[in-house]
Amino acid sequence: MEKLLQLSTVKRYEFFIRYCADFENVWGLSSGADNWIIYNKANGDEVFPLWPHLDLAKTCCYDEHLEMGATPQSISLEVFIAECIPDMNSHGVKFVIFSNSEGEGVIVDGLKAELEYKARAVWE
């Protein structure tokens, strides 16, 4: 896991896409039933943090989220692509992918096409 955390933000993003397509899950932070943690970046962007694995979500999430009772929760890739991405996009929320404990991650809003493309290659 330590080697993954030392990768550049772009390499962590690429790993996220491949891993999530292969294992058909993404991980976010939840503070209850479908109550996802979304926070504001310094530039004003609202972002939904995502990780490829439970252990990475636990390691990289902010202490303030844990203090609020947030816990890592998985989302099936199918539900994430079909429901979560369109819902977040309709509210102007972007995704911060595989951020580390310093908050460094790739912020994207066009995640659906790339995940669908990679997942289709795995599913076929």
Image (cartoon, rainbow, N blue to C red):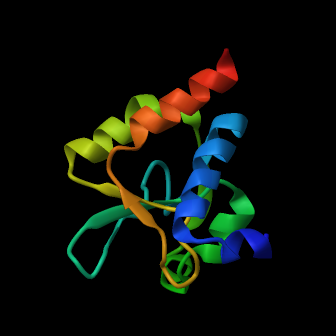
Quadrant in which the C terminus appears = top right
Q: Is residue 78 visible?
A: no
Q: Is residue 49 visible?
A: yes
Residue drawn where x is 41% and y is 33% of the image: 113
Front residue of 10/110: it is 10
Q: Is residue 22 above or below residue 91?
A: above
Residue drawn where x is 69% and y is 56% of the image: 53
Residue drawn where x is 27% and y is 82% of the image: 42
In this image, 69 relative to 124: left or right? left
Which quadrant of the view contains residue 4? bottom right
In this image, 87 relative to 112: left or right? left
Residue at the top extreme of this rendering = 124
Q: Is residue 3 above or below residue 124?
A: below
Residue drawn where x is 32% and y is 50% of the image: 109
Q: Is residue 21 above or below residue 109?
A: above
Quadrant in which the N terminus appears = bottom right
Q: Position of residue 80 (x, y in %)?
A: 48, 37
Q: Position of residue 85 (x, y in %)?
A: 37, 40
Q: Position of residue 27 (x, y in %)?
A: 59, 53
Q: Position of residue 61 (x, y in %)?
A: 56, 74
Count of labels in the image: 0
